[in-house]
Image: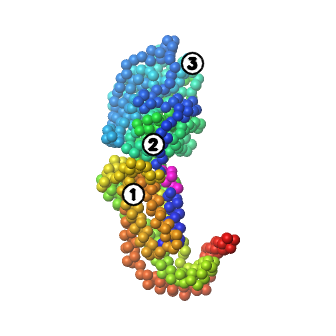
Amino acid sequence: MDKNQLIGMMLISMMLITYTQFYAPKPPEQAVQAAHATAAGVAPALHPTQEPHLTMAPIPEQGGGFAVAMQGTEREVVVENDVLKVTLTSHGGRIKAVVLKNYKDHKGEPLTLLDGQSSVMGFQFTAQAIPLNTSAFFFDTAEQGIEDGGARTITFTLAVGPGQYIRQVFSLPKKGYTLTHRWEMVGLGSVLGEEPLQFVWHDLIKRAEGDSKACRNKTTINYYLANNKFNHLTEQSDKLQDKVLEEPVQWVGIKQRFFTAAIIAEDAFAGGHVTLSPTPNSEATMKEAKVWLTLPTVAPQQDKKGQFTFYFGPNDYNTLKQVTKGFSNNISLGWPVVRWINQFLIIPVFAFLEQYISNYGIIIILLVLLIKILLLPLSYKSYISMAKMKVVKPALDAMKAKHGTDMQKIQMEQMGMYREMGINPLSGCIPVLLQMPILLAMFNFFPNAIALRQQGFLWATDLSTYDAIIQLPFTIPAYGSHVSLFTLLMTASTLLYTWSTNQLTPPEGPMKMVTYMMPFTFMFILNSFPAGLSFYYFVSNLATFGQQSLIKRFVNEEKLKKKLEENKVNNKGKKQSRFQRHLAGMMKAEVSEKVRKNAKK
C-alpha cells in the first residue's frame, strides 16, 4: 500500500468515523426530570399506562350542547383494507387505534402503531370563553356504504343546537396506508371564540423493535413547510425539544426507525408547534410527541371546514415518495451525493433483486458483486498504481540511501522520476476516494432498510439489528455488552485484505501499524450496527480480495517495468505540464517547511 493510497484510506476512515457519529447508537438518559416537561408550558409526560388526554376545563351547564355531549356511550367502528386496520371511536369522533396488518412488533404480535393508551387527537377551540376539545365529546355515528373506488366511510356528528353541528368524516380506501379525514363546523360562528382553531395530537410513541436503543435514536418529529423546506427535531437528543413552526406547514410526521404516523394538510396549516421528550418508561415507549397545528382562519361568521390525510405505514422509500411532496425525507439517506447514490442505485437494485429472491443474505451477496463489477475500473487503476509503486520501490530505496536524511532532495528526485516514468502520484489515492460515496451510502441504507426487518440469515435472526452471539455480563466502552459475529468476520476479512495489500507494497515505519489498527477501529463502530451492514462489508472484503487476485493474473510486472523505463526515455527532458509544476511546487514547499521546523528543533 503506497503513501497516497494510505492517505486515501485514512481519509475514508476519518470520514466514516465522523459520519457514523450521526448514526451510532447513543444510550438515552434514564431519569427524566419533570423540569424538562414543564418547559415551554408543556404538561409533564404521562405514564405509558395512562391514556393520554387533551386538557380541557369543566363545562358549566350553560355550555349548552357541548355540556350535554360530555356524557354518552362510546361506540367503536373498525375499518380495514389490505394493509391497515383502523379503529375509530365515537368518543371524540377520532382515530383510536391503528394496526399495520403486514408487520409484527418485537414480540411477534400485530404491529399496533398507536392505540387508546398511547395516542389521542382532536380539535381545540373556545366557545363562549370556554376552552374545548372534540376528544372529550361523544359523537353520533353513521356508517355509509362503500364509495366509488372501494373506500369505506364513517361519519361522526355532534349536534350543538338547531343548525349547529360538528361533523367528522373518515374514509379508508381499498388499498394503501392513507386515511382521509374531512371535517366541518357549521353554524357555530356566533359561538366560537376568536382564538385560532387548532388540531392537537398527543402520542406516546410505542416500541416496535427489539433493539430499543436503536429505535429510540431514530425516533423524531419531521415536518415539511409550504415553502418546500424539510426539517426535523434531533433524533438522538435525550432532552425536551420544543419548536414553534411560524411558517405554513404542509405535513408533520411522528417518525420511528421503520414506521411513520403523519398528518398531511390538503392545502397547508397556518403554523404549528411541536415538542418531543423522553418518557419515564423507556422500554415500553420510545418518546413523547405533542403536535399543535393551527388551521387557516376564516371570517368569524363563516363555517369552518377542511380535510387532512393521515399516513400510517412503513418507512419504505418507494411507498413514501408516492404519498406527497417531500415525504420520502422521512428516510434519512445521507448527504446529497450519498442520498443520490441510494436513490438511484442502491434502492432500485435492491428492489429489483427482491422481486426474484426471497433470501436477503443472498440479495446482499449479489448487491456486493454488482457494485464490485461497477467499480472494477477504479479497482483496476488502484491495483496498477500499487504495482507501479512496487516496480519503482528499488529505485526509491536507492534514492533514500543516496541522500540520507535530506528529504528535500529525495522528494524532488522522486517527483522527477515520477514525471519521467509517467506516474501520477495521486493515482493510488483518487480511485479509493471515488469509492467513498458508496461506502457512506451503505451506512445510511442498511440501518433504514425496512426490508431487512425481522429477516434472518444463517445465525442472524434479524438482519436489521446486530447479531449477538455472546451477551457480556459487563459493558465495554465504545463497544457494547454483546459480541456481533458478522462484525468479527468483517474485521478478520479486513485484516486479511490489509495483509494482502501490504505484501504488494509494504508500508514503512509507523504506517504499518496504522493499516492494522483501522480494522479494529471499525470493529468497535459496527458492533451495534445492523448485521446486514457488517455482512455486506464482510462479503465486500472477500470480493475485493478475490478481485485483486484475478487482476493480478492479468498484470505482468516485467512488462509494466519495461513500459515505465520506456516512458523514462521518451519523457526525459520533456517540459512539465502546469499541473505537474504546481504539484512539484507544493511538495517542495511542504518539504522546505519540514526542513525549517526540524532545524528549529
Label 2: state its secondary structure: helix
Disc 3 or 1, which lies upstream in sequence? 3
Label 3: state its secondary structure: loop
Residue 531 in the image: state x and y as whole percent. Answer: 38, 54
Type of amino acid under label 3: Ala
The residue that mark 1 highlights is 487
Residue 63 visible to the viewer: yes
The residue that mark 3 highlights is 129
Instruction: Report the Cα–Cα distance between label 2 and label 3.
Output: 40 Å
For residue 348, above or below residue 102: below
Type of amino acid under label 1: Thr
At 56% from the left edge and 43% from the top edge, which residue is drawn?
A: 227
The residue that mark 2 highlights is 216
Q: Nearer the viewer, residue 505 or 338?
A: 505
Can you name the residue that lies furthest to the top here? 61
At 42% from the left edge and 28% from the top edge, which residue is drawn?
A: 50
Q: Is residue 22 magenta?
A: yes
Disc 2 or 3, which lies upstream in sequence? 3
Left or right, residue 146 beside residue 517: left
Residue 248 visible to the viewer: no
Residue 597 in the image: state x and y as whole percent. Answer: 67, 70
Residue 354 in the image: state x and y as whole percent. Answer: 33, 54
Q: Nearer the viewer, mark 1 or mark 2?
A: 1
Is mark 3 in CB contact (under 8 Å) with mark 1? no
For residue 179, above or below residue 553: above
Type of amino acid under label 2: Arg
* Magenta-drawn segment: 18-23
